[in-house]
Image (cartoon, helix red, strand yellow):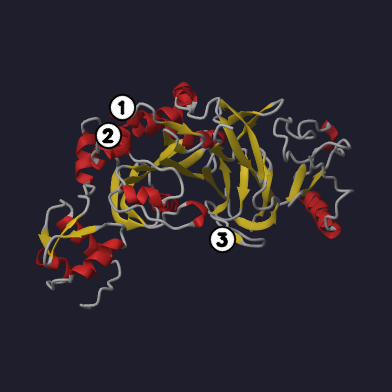
Amino acid sequence: MPSKSALLPEPARDEQLLKLLADGNIHSTARVATAFGGETPPLETLAVLLGHYGVEIEVAGDDRLRLKHPIELLEADRIVTSLQRSGSAPHRIDLAFSIDSTNQALIKRAGLQDAHRHVYLAEFQRAGRGRRGKAWIAPLGSGLCMSVAWDLRVAPEILPSLGLTTATVAVRVLRNLGIDDVGIKWPNDIWWKNCKLGGILVETRVGPHNKHTAVAGIGINVAFPQRRLCEIEQPYTDIRTALGRGVSRNALAAALLHELHTAFTIFERFGFAPFYDECRGYDVVYRQKVQLSWRGARLVGRAFGIDPSGALSLEMEDSICRFESGDLSLRLAD
Amino acid sequence: MPTNSLYQKKMDIRKVKKLIELLEESGIAELEIHEGEESVRISRYRALPMGQPFLQLADPQLPAAPGHAVAPADAKPKPDFEGHSITAPMVGTFYLGASPTSKPFVEMGQRIKRGEILCIIEAMKVMNQIEADSDGTIAAILVDNGQPVEYDQPLFVLKRT
Protein backbone atom coordinates (compact mmCIF):
# COMPACT_ATOMS: atom_id res chain seq x y z
CA MET A 1 0.00 0.00 0.00
CA PRO A 2 1.22 3.52 -0.60
CA SER A 3 2.97 5.07 2.35
CA LYS A 4 2.33 8.63 1.17
CA SER A 5 -0.47 10.46 2.87
CA ALA A 6 -2.70 10.24 -0.18
CA LEU A 7 -5.25 7.47 -0.12
CA LEU A 8 -8.42 7.91 -2.07
CA PRO A 9 -11.70 7.11 -0.37
CA GLU A 10 -12.73 3.50 -0.75
CA PRO A 11 -16.09 2.84 0.89
CA ALA A 12 -15.66 -0.78 2.01
CA ARG A 13 -12.27 -0.16 3.61
CA ASP A 14 -13.24 3.17 5.09
CA GLU A 15 -16.40 1.76 6.60
CA GLN A 16 -14.29 -0.87 8.33
CA LEU A 17 -11.92 1.86 9.54
CA LEU A 18 -14.75 3.97 10.90
CA LYS A 19 -16.24 1.00 12.71
CA LEU A 20 -12.94 0.50 14.50
CA LEU A 21 -12.71 4.14 15.53
CA ALA A 22 -16.38 5.11 15.97
CA ASP A 23 -16.47 4.80 19.77
CA GLY A 24 -14.25 7.86 20.17
CA ASN A 25 -11.77 6.06 22.40
CA ILE A 26 -8.02 6.29 21.89
CA HIS A 27 -6.75 3.64 19.50
CA SER A 28 -3.35 2.79 18.11
CA THR A 29 -2.77 2.94 14.38
CA ALA A 30 -1.90 -0.75 14.61
CA ARG A 31 -5.48 -1.43 15.63
CA VAL A 32 -6.84 -0.17 12.34
CA ALA A 33 -4.29 -2.14 10.28
CA THR A 34 -6.88 -4.83 9.53
CA ALA A 35 -8.74 -2.32 7.36
CA PHE A 36 -5.55 -1.79 5.34
CA GLY A 37 -4.69 -5.41 4.64
CA GLY A 38 -2.60 -5.74 7.78
CA GLU A 39 -0.33 -2.76 7.18
CA THR A 40 -0.31 -0.03 9.76
CA PRO A 41 -1.12 3.30 8.15
CA PRO A 42 0.72 6.46 9.24
CA LEU A 43 -1.29 8.96 11.26
CA GLU A 44 -1.25 11.64 8.59
CA THR A 45 -2.63 9.19 6.02
CA LEU A 46 -5.52 8.50 8.32
CA ALA A 47 -6.10 12.19 8.99
CA VAL A 48 -6.27 13.00 5.28
CA LEU A 49 -8.40 9.98 4.47
CA LEU A 50 -10.94 10.68 7.18
CA GLY A 51 -10.94 14.32 6.13
CA HIS A 52 -12.63 13.23 2.91
CA TYR A 53 -15.62 12.32 5.06
CA GLY A 54 -15.46 15.45 7.15
CA VAL A 55 -14.30 13.40 10.12
CA GLU A 56 -11.62 14.92 12.35
CA ILE A 57 -9.14 13.09 14.50
CA GLU A 58 -7.07 14.04 17.50
CA VAL A 59 -3.56 12.73 17.87
CA ALA A 60 -3.06 11.20 21.29
CA GLY A 61 0.63 10.46 21.44
CA ASP A 62 2.83 8.41 19.12
CA ASP A 63 0.74 6.38 16.70
CA ARG A 64 -2.34 6.85 18.77
CA LEU A 65 -5.46 8.68 17.79
CA ARG A 66 -9.13 9.11 18.47
CA LEU A 67 -12.07 10.65 16.68
CA LYS A 68 -12.73 14.19 17.80
CA HIS A 69 -16.43 13.34 17.92
CA PRO A 70 -17.58 9.74 18.47
CA ILE A 71 -19.98 8.48 15.79
CA GLU A 72 -23.05 6.35 16.24
CA LEU A 73 -23.07 4.37 13.01
CA LEU A 74 -26.40 3.37 11.53
CA GLU A 75 -27.56 -0.22 11.99
CA ALA A 76 -30.33 -1.46 9.76
CA ASP A 77 -31.08 -4.39 12.08
CA ARG A 78 -31.68 -2.10 15.03
CA ILE A 79 -34.05 0.08 13.04
CA VAL A 80 -36.00 -2.89 11.66
CA THR A 81 -36.28 -4.55 15.06
CA SER A 82 -37.77 -1.49 16.69
CA LEU A 83 -40.29 -1.14 13.85
CA GLN A 84 -41.35 -4.78 13.70
CA ARG A 85 -43.22 -4.46 16.96
CA SER A 86 -45.46 -1.77 15.47
CA GLY A 87 -45.96 -3.56 12.17
CA SER A 88 -44.40 -0.72 10.22
CA ALA A 89 -41.13 -2.39 9.26
CA PRO A 90 -40.01 -1.54 5.74
CA HIS A 91 -40.03 -4.24 3.09
CA ARG A 92 -36.40 -3.61 2.46
CA ILE A 93 -33.77 -1.42 4.04
CA ASP A 94 -30.47 -0.52 2.40
CA LEU A 95 -27.65 1.18 4.15
CA ALA A 96 -25.00 2.83 2.03
CA PHE A 97 -21.77 3.96 3.56
CA SER A 98 -21.29 6.63 0.95
CA ILE A 99 -23.69 7.66 -1.80
CA ASP A 100 -24.49 10.61 -4.07
CA SER A 101 -28.12 10.72 -3.10
CA THR A 102 -30.41 8.25 -1.36
CA ASN A 103 -33.37 9.71 -3.28
CA GLN A 104 -31.65 9.15 -6.59
CA ALA A 105 -30.91 5.53 -5.69
CA LEU A 106 -34.53 4.82 -4.85
CA ILE A 107 -36.17 6.71 -7.70
CA LYS A 108 -33.91 4.83 -10.09
CA ARG A 109 -34.95 1.56 -8.50
CA ALA A 110 -38.62 2.52 -8.75
CA GLY A 111 -38.25 2.68 -12.53
CA LEU A 112 -36.89 -0.84 -12.69
CA GLN A 113 -38.65 -2.86 -10.06
CA ASP A 114 -41.09 -2.77 -7.20
CA ALA A 115 -39.69 -0.32 -4.67
CA HIS A 116 -42.72 -0.02 -2.43
CA ARG A 117 -41.71 0.47 1.21
CA HIS A 118 -38.02 0.34 0.45
CA VAL A 119 -35.82 2.53 2.61
CA TYR A 120 -32.40 3.88 1.81
CA LEU A 121 -30.10 5.30 4.45
CA ALA A 122 -26.62 6.72 4.01
CA GLU A 123 -23.87 7.46 6.46
CA PHE A 124 -22.38 9.99 4.10
CA GLN A 125 -23.91 11.85 1.21
CA ARG A 126 -21.33 13.01 -1.30
CA ALA A 127 -23.44 15.42 -3.28
CA GLY A 128 -24.03 17.92 -0.49
CA ARG A 129 -24.02 21.46 -1.74
CA GLY A 130 -24.10 24.77 0.04
CA ARG A 131 -25.47 28.05 -1.03
CA ARG A 132 -24.23 29.77 -4.18
CA GLY A 133 -22.92 26.48 -5.43
CA LYS A 134 -20.21 26.39 -2.79
CA ALA A 135 -19.43 22.79 -2.04
CA TRP A 136 -19.52 21.62 1.53
CA ILE A 137 -19.90 18.29 3.12
CA ALA A 138 -22.04 17.16 5.96
CA PRO A 139 -19.50 15.23 8.03
CA LEU A 140 -20.12 11.50 8.21
CA GLY A 141 -22.46 10.65 11.03
CA SER A 142 -23.48 14.27 11.66
CA GLY A 143 -26.96 13.93 10.28
CA LEU A 144 -29.66 11.60 9.19
CA CYS A 145 -30.10 11.11 5.49
CA MET A 146 -32.93 8.80 4.58
CA SER A 147 -35.31 8.12 1.71
CA VAL A 148 -38.49 6.09 1.64
CA ALA A 149 -40.26 4.82 -1.48
CA TRP A 150 -44.01 4.38 -1.44
CA ASP A 151 -46.49 3.34 -4.11
CA LEU A 152 -49.53 5.61 -4.17
CA ARG A 153 -52.76 5.26 -6.06
CA VAL A 154 -53.94 8.84 -6.01
CA ALA A 155 -54.94 11.56 -8.42
CA PRO A 156 -51.61 13.01 -9.59
CA GLU A 157 -52.57 16.59 -8.82
CA ILE A 158 -52.33 15.93 -5.09
CA LEU A 159 -48.74 14.64 -5.29
CA PRO A 160 -47.19 18.10 -4.74
CA SER A 161 -48.73 18.21 -1.28
CA LEU A 162 -46.78 15.10 -0.31
CA GLY A 163 -43.78 17.34 0.36
CA LEU A 164 -45.64 19.28 3.04
CA THR A 165 -47.12 16.06 4.38
CA THR A 166 -43.63 14.63 4.83
CA ALA A 167 -42.40 17.86 6.42
CA THR A 168 -45.36 17.81 8.81
CA VAL A 169 -44.52 14.28 9.90
CA ALA A 170 -40.83 15.13 10.37
CA VAL A 171 -41.70 18.16 12.51
CA ARG A 172 -44.10 16.06 14.57
CA VAL A 173 -41.32 13.56 15.31
CA LEU A 174 -38.91 16.35 16.27
CA ARG A 175 -41.50 17.95 18.55
CA ASN A 176 -42.09 14.59 20.18
CA LEU A 177 -38.37 14.54 20.93
CA GLY A 178 -38.82 17.81 22.78
CA ILE A 179 -37.85 20.45 20.20
CA ASP A 180 -40.85 22.71 20.77
CA ASP A 181 -40.18 25.55 18.37
CA VAL A 182 -39.37 23.49 15.32
CA GLY A 183 -41.55 24.16 12.29
CA ILE A 184 -41.89 24.25 8.52
CA LYS A 185 -40.55 26.96 6.29
CA TRP A 186 -42.70 26.54 3.20
CA PRO A 187 -42.48 24.40 1.26
CA ASN A 188 -39.75 21.96 2.24
CA ASP A 189 -37.45 23.24 4.97
CA ILE A 190 -37.45 22.31 8.63
CA TRP A 191 -36.62 25.35 10.71
CA TRP A 192 -35.77 26.04 14.29
CA LYS A 193 -35.38 29.64 15.46
CA ASN A 194 -34.64 30.99 11.97
CA CYS A 195 -32.08 28.28 11.29
CA LYS A 196 -32.30 25.28 9.02
CA LEU A 197 -32.51 22.04 10.94
CA GLY A 198 -33.38 19.85 7.99
CA GLY A 199 -35.02 19.57 4.62
CA ILE A 200 -37.40 17.45 2.63
CA LEU A 201 -37.06 16.40 -0.99
CA VAL A 202 -39.92 14.46 -2.49
CA GLU A 203 -39.62 13.03 -5.97
CA THR A 204 -42.29 11.03 -7.72
CA ARG A 205 -42.72 8.87 -10.77
CA VAL A 206 -46.10 9.73 -12.19
CA GLY A 207 -47.59 6.88 -14.17
CA PRO A 208 -50.87 6.42 -16.01
CA HIS A 209 -54.04 5.23 -14.25
CA ASN A 210 -53.18 7.04 -11.00
CA LYS A 211 -50.35 4.63 -10.22
CA HIS A 212 -47.36 6.45 -8.86
CA THR A 213 -44.30 5.87 -6.76
CA ALA A 214 -43.14 8.59 -4.42
CA VAL A 215 -39.69 8.83 -2.89
CA ALA A 216 -39.60 10.99 0.20
CA GLY A 217 -36.13 12.10 1.23
CA ILE A 218 -35.49 13.53 4.68
CA GLY A 219 -32.27 15.15 5.78
CA ILE A 220 -31.88 16.23 9.40
CA ASN A 221 -28.82 17.74 11.03
CA VAL A 222 -28.23 15.75 14.19
CA ALA A 223 -24.88 16.90 15.53
CA PHE A 224 -22.60 19.06 13.45
CA PRO A 225 -19.18 20.07 14.69
CA GLN A 226 -19.60 23.77 15.56
CA ARG A 227 -16.80 24.85 13.25
CA ARG A 228 -18.61 23.23 10.35
CA LEU A 229 -21.82 25.05 11.11
CA CYS A 230 -19.99 28.34 10.70
CA GLU A 231 -18.62 27.32 7.29
CA ILE A 232 -22.07 27.02 5.80
CA GLU A 233 -23.31 30.30 4.39
CA GLN A 234 -26.77 29.74 5.69
CA PRO A 235 -28.05 29.77 9.23
CA TYR A 236 -27.86 26.09 10.08
CA THR A 237 -28.49 24.32 13.30
CA ASP A 238 -28.66 20.76 14.55
CA ILE A 239 -30.72 18.69 16.99
CA ARG A 240 -27.97 18.81 19.60
CA THR A 241 -28.18 22.60 19.67
CA ALA A 242 -31.98 22.74 19.57
CA LEU A 243 -32.47 20.09 22.20
CA GLY A 244 -29.43 20.62 24.36
CA ARG A 245 -28.44 16.98 24.02
CA GLY A 246 -27.67 14.48 21.30
CA VAL A 247 -30.06 11.82 20.01
CA SER A 248 -29.56 8.37 18.56
CA ARG A 249 -29.69 8.47 14.78
CA ASN A 250 -30.98 4.90 14.70
CA ALA A 251 -33.82 5.79 17.06
CA LEU A 252 -34.62 8.92 15.06
CA ALA A 253 -34.72 6.93 11.81
CA ALA A 254 -37.08 4.39 13.38
CA ALA A 255 -39.38 7.11 14.78
CA LEU A 256 -39.56 8.84 11.40
CA LEU A 257 -40.22 5.60 9.53
CA HIS A 258 -42.98 4.65 11.90
CA GLU A 259 -44.78 7.99 11.48
CA LEU A 260 -44.22 8.06 7.72
CA HIS A 261 -45.72 4.61 7.35
CA THR A 262 -48.94 5.77 8.97
CA ALA A 263 -48.92 9.11 7.17
CA PHE A 264 -48.50 7.67 3.67
CA THR A 265 -51.29 5.20 4.31
CA ILE A 266 -53.58 8.08 5.34
CA PHE A 267 -52.39 10.29 2.47
CA GLU A 268 -53.28 7.64 -0.08
CA ARG A 269 -56.89 7.58 1.13
CA PHE A 270 -57.53 11.17 2.13
CA GLY A 271 -54.76 13.30 0.62
CA PHE A 272 -53.33 16.32 2.39
CA ALA A 273 -56.53 17.25 4.27
CA PRO A 274 -55.86 15.22 7.45
CA PHE A 275 -52.44 16.92 7.77
CA TYR A 276 -53.54 20.42 6.91
CA ASP A 277 -54.35 21.82 10.34
CA GLU A 278 -51.23 20.34 11.87
CA CYS A 279 -49.13 21.67 8.99
CA ARG A 280 -50.55 25.17 9.42
CA GLY A 281 -49.71 25.00 13.10
CA TYR A 282 -46.07 24.39 12.16
CA ASP A 283 -45.87 27.27 9.65
CA VAL A 284 -42.94 29.38 10.89
CA VAL A 285 -43.37 32.19 8.36
CA TYR A 286 -47.04 32.91 9.00
CA ARG A 287 -47.53 36.71 9.20
CA GLN A 288 -43.79 37.23 8.74
CA LYS A 289 -42.33 39.62 6.22
CA VAL A 290 -40.91 37.49 3.45
CA GLN A 291 -39.38 37.65 0.05
CA LEU A 292 -40.40 35.15 -2.56
CA SER A 293 -38.22 34.51 -5.59
CA TRP A 294 -40.70 33.49 -8.19
CA ARG A 295 -39.92 32.99 -11.86
CA GLY A 296 -37.17 35.55 -11.83
CA ALA A 297 -39.17 38.12 -9.86
CA ARG A 298 -38.62 39.07 -6.25
CA LEU A 299 -41.89 39.58 -4.50
CA VAL A 300 -42.07 41.11 -1.08
CA GLY A 301 -44.99 40.70 1.20
CA ARG A 302 -46.35 39.14 4.31
CA ALA A 303 -46.86 35.39 4.39
CA PHE A 304 -50.55 34.67 4.70
CA GLY A 305 -50.47 30.99 5.40
CA ILE A 306 -50.65 27.69 3.58
CA ASP A 307 -53.87 26.80 1.76
CA PRO A 308 -55.57 23.39 1.65
CA SER A 309 -53.72 22.45 -1.54
CA GLY A 310 -50.39 23.32 0.07
CA ALA A 311 -49.83 26.56 -1.85
CA LEU A 312 -48.54 29.64 -0.02
CA SER A 313 -50.54 32.84 0.13
CA LEU A 314 -48.66 36.09 0.12
CA GLU A 315 -50.18 39.40 1.10
CA MET A 316 -48.73 42.08 -1.08
CA GLU A 317 -49.52 45.77 -1.35
CA ASP A 318 -53.17 45.48 -2.22
CA SER A 319 -53.76 41.85 -3.01
CA ILE A 320 -53.30 38.35 -1.73
CA CYS A 321 -51.81 35.90 -4.20
CA ARG A 322 -51.21 32.21 -3.94
CA PHE A 323 -48.08 30.48 -5.15
CA GLU A 324 -47.37 26.88 -5.97
CA SER A 325 -43.67 27.46 -6.40
CA GLY A 326 -40.90 29.82 -5.45
CA ASP A 327 -38.02 30.23 -3.03
CA LEU A 328 -38.97 31.84 0.20
CA SER A 329 -36.63 33.83 2.36
CA LEU A 330 -37.37 35.62 5.56
CA ARG A 331 -36.63 39.32 5.55
CA LEU A 332 -35.11 40.93 8.54
CA ALA A 333 -37.41 43.44 10.16
CA ASP A 334 -36.96 46.78 8.45
CA MET B 1 -46.62 43.80 -16.35
CA PRO B 2 -45.86 42.37 -19.78
CA THR B 3 -48.78 41.54 -22.02
CA ASN B 4 -47.51 39.55 -24.91
CA SER B 5 -49.24 39.27 -28.17
CA LEU B 6 -48.35 37.41 -31.29
CA TYR B 7 -48.72 40.61 -33.28
CA GLN B 8 -46.42 42.73 -31.17
CA LYS B 9 -43.51 40.42 -30.73
CA LYS B 10 -41.11 38.92 -33.16
CA MET B 11 -41.71 35.24 -32.72
CA ASP B 12 -40.43 33.40 -35.77
CA ILE B 13 -43.31 33.17 -38.24
CA ARG B 14 -42.12 29.85 -39.62
CA LYS B 15 -42.29 28.42 -36.17
CA VAL B 16 -45.82 29.69 -35.73
CA LYS B 17 -46.79 28.19 -39.07
CA LYS B 18 -45.35 24.88 -38.02
CA LEU B 19 -47.28 25.04 -34.80
CA ILE B 20 -50.52 25.68 -36.65
CA GLU B 21 -49.83 22.67 -38.88
CA LEU B 22 -49.16 20.64 -35.81
CA LEU B 23 -52.43 21.72 -34.28
CA GLU B 24 -54.26 20.83 -37.49
CA GLU B 25 -52.79 17.36 -37.56
CA SER B 26 -52.97 16.49 -33.97
CA GLY B 27 -56.52 16.98 -32.83
CA ILE B 28 -55.35 19.17 -29.99
CA ALA B 29 -57.82 21.89 -29.20
CA GLU B 30 -55.32 24.51 -28.24
CA LEU B 31 -51.65 24.94 -27.63
CA GLU B 32 -49.55 27.52 -25.96
CA ILE B 33 -45.84 28.06 -26.36
CA HIS B 34 -43.65 30.15 -24.14
CA GLU B 35 -40.26 31.37 -25.22
CA GLY B 36 -38.50 33.63 -22.79
CA GLU B 37 -40.89 36.53 -22.28
CA GLU B 38 -42.87 35.78 -25.39
CA SER B 39 -45.74 33.44 -25.67
CA VAL B 40 -48.24 32.39 -28.27
CA ARG B 41 -51.49 30.56 -27.85
CA ILE B 42 -53.10 28.92 -30.85
CA SER B 43 -56.64 27.75 -30.53
CA ARG B 44 -58.92 25.96 -32.98
CA TYR B 45 -62.01 27.68 -31.77
CA ARG B 46 -61.72 31.39 -31.35
CA ALA B 47 -59.21 34.10 -31.00
CA LEU B 48 -58.29 35.25 -27.55
CA PRO B 49 -59.85 38.59 -26.68
CA MET B 50 -57.42 41.37 -27.45
CA GLY B 51 -55.43 42.66 -24.60
CA GLN B 52 -55.78 39.55 -22.49
CA PRO B 53 -52.53 38.56 -20.93
CA PHE B 54 -51.48 35.11 -22.03
CA LEU B 55 -48.88 34.75 -19.43
CA GLN B 56 -49.35 35.23 -15.73
CA LEU B 57 -45.94 36.66 -15.28
CA ALA B 58 -46.28 38.80 -12.24
CA ASP B 59 -49.96 38.58 -11.62
CA PRO B 60 -50.72 35.16 -10.20
CA GLN B 61 -54.12 36.08 -8.80
CA LEU B 62 -55.51 36.35 -12.31
CA PRO B 63 -57.89 33.60 -13.19
CA ALA B 64 -56.59 30.95 -15.56
CA ALA B 65 -56.28 32.29 -19.07
CA PRO B 66 -59.65 32.33 -20.78
CA GLY B 67 -60.48 30.30 -23.83
CA HIS B 68 -60.09 26.95 -22.13
CA ALA B 69 -63.61 26.12 -21.23
CA VAL B 70 -65.85 27.38 -23.97
CA ALA B 71 -65.78 25.43 -27.18
CA PRO B 72 -68.59 25.49 -29.72
CA ALA B 73 -70.18 22.08 -29.90
CA ASP B 74 -69.97 21.92 -33.68
CA ALA B 75 -66.21 22.40 -33.79
CA LYS B 76 -65.07 19.12 -32.35
CA PRO B 77 -61.54 18.21 -33.43
CA LYS B 78 -61.33 15.19 -35.67
CA PRO B 79 -59.38 12.43 -33.99
CA ASP B 80 -57.79 11.38 -37.26
CA PHE B 81 -54.20 11.45 -36.12
CA GLU B 82 -52.51 8.35 -34.82
CA GLY B 83 -50.65 10.39 -32.23
CA HIS B 84 -51.97 11.70 -28.98
CA SER B 85 -51.01 14.45 -26.64
CA ILE B 86 -49.57 13.90 -23.20
CA THR B 87 -51.01 16.47 -20.88
CA ALA B 88 -49.85 17.92 -17.58
CA PRO B 89 -51.24 15.87 -14.70
CA MET B 90 -50.75 18.81 -12.34
CA VAL B 91 -49.99 22.50 -12.15
CA GLY B 92 -46.32 23.37 -11.90
CA THR B 93 -43.10 24.25 -13.67
CA PHE B 94 -42.07 22.16 -16.65
CA TYR B 95 -38.51 20.85 -16.94
CA LEU B 96 -37.11 18.82 -19.81
CA GLY B 97 -34.13 17.52 -17.81
CA ALA B 98 -33.38 16.35 -14.30
CA SER B 99 -31.25 19.44 -13.61
CA PRO B 100 -30.25 22.61 -15.48
CA THR B 101 -27.03 20.93 -16.63
CA SER B 102 -28.30 17.46 -17.47
CA LYS B 103 -29.49 16.59 -20.94
CA PRO B 104 -33.21 16.42 -21.68
CA PHE B 105 -35.06 13.18 -20.98
CA VAL B 106 -36.39 13.12 -24.53
CA GLU B 107 -35.85 14.88 -27.82
CA MET B 108 -37.90 15.42 -30.96
CA GLY B 109 -38.18 12.29 -33.06
CA GLN B 110 -36.98 10.05 -30.26
CA ARG B 111 -38.64 6.67 -29.88
CA ILE B 112 -39.72 6.00 -26.38
CA LYS B 113 -41.22 3.17 -24.45
CA ARG B 114 -44.18 3.24 -22.12
CA GLY B 115 -42.98 4.11 -18.63
CA GLU B 116 -39.99 6.16 -19.75
CA ILE B 117 -39.61 9.58 -18.15
CA LEU B 118 -40.54 12.47 -20.43
CA CYS B 119 -40.15 15.50 -18.19
CA ILE B 120 -40.40 16.84 -14.68
CA ILE B 121 -43.17 19.04 -13.34
CA GLU B 122 -42.11 20.77 -10.16
CA ALA B 123 -44.60 22.13 -7.67
CA MET B 124 -43.92 23.05 -4.07
CA LYS B 125 -40.42 21.62 -4.51
CA VAL B 126 -41.85 18.20 -5.28
CA MET B 127 -40.21 16.85 -8.43
CA ASN B 128 -42.72 14.85 -10.41
CA GLN B 129 -41.23 12.72 -13.16
CA ILE B 130 -43.88 12.19 -15.81
CA GLU B 131 -43.91 8.77 -17.48
CA ALA B 132 -44.96 8.05 -21.04
CA ASP B 133 -48.30 6.24 -21.09
CA SER B 134 -47.52 4.34 -24.27
CA ASP B 135 -44.77 3.53 -26.75
CA GLY B 136 -44.22 6.00 -29.53
CA THR B 137 -42.17 8.71 -31.14
CA ILE B 138 -41.97 12.25 -29.84
CA ALA B 139 -43.68 14.26 -32.57
CA ALA B 140 -43.76 17.56 -30.69
CA ILE B 141 -42.57 19.16 -27.51
CA LEU B 142 -45.11 21.84 -26.80
CA VAL B 143 -43.66 23.63 -23.78
CA ASP B 144 -40.27 25.26 -23.26
CA ASN B 145 -38.01 24.30 -20.42
CA GLY B 146 -38.72 26.19 -17.21
CA GLN B 147 -42.20 27.37 -18.20
CA PRO B 148 -45.28 27.10 -16.01
CA VAL B 149 -47.91 24.58 -17.06
CA GLU B 150 -51.57 24.35 -16.20
CA TYR B 151 -53.49 21.22 -15.36
CA ASP B 152 -54.30 19.26 -18.52
CA GLN B 153 -52.13 21.44 -20.74
CA PRO B 154 -50.67 19.44 -23.65
CA LEU B 155 -46.93 18.86 -23.16
CA PHE B 156 -45.93 16.40 -25.88
CA VAL B 157 -47.41 14.83 -28.94
CA LEU B 158 -46.65 11.15 -29.08
CA LYS B 159 -47.00 9.39 -32.41
CA ARG B 160 -47.63 5.70 -32.14
CA THR B 161 -45.07 3.67 -34.02
Q: Is residue B64 above or below residue A215?
A: above
Q: Quadrant of the C terminus of chain A?
A: top right
Name the outermost residue toward the top.
Answer: A277
Across and down, in percent, residue A312 comes to 58, 31
Q: Which residue is identified by label 1?
A: A176
Q: Nearer the viewer, residue A91 or A65?
A: A65
The secondary element bearing badge 2 is classed as: loop
Q: CA distance from mark 2 to mark 3?
A: 41 Å
- On screen, residue B36 versus residue A112, left or right, reads right
Of tags 2 and 3, which is closer to the observer? 2
- The subunit letter for the residue under badge 3 reads B
Q: CA distance from mark 3 to mark 1?
A: 40 Å
Callout 1 touching callout 2 (CB < 8 Å): no
Q: Nearer the viewer, residue A181 or A119?
A: A181
- Residue A244's label in the rendered image is 2
Q: Which residue is identified by label 3?
A: B101
- On screen, residue A244 versus residue B23, left or right, reads left
**Type of the residue with mark 1:** Asn
Q: Nearer the viewer, residue A88 or B12?
A: B12
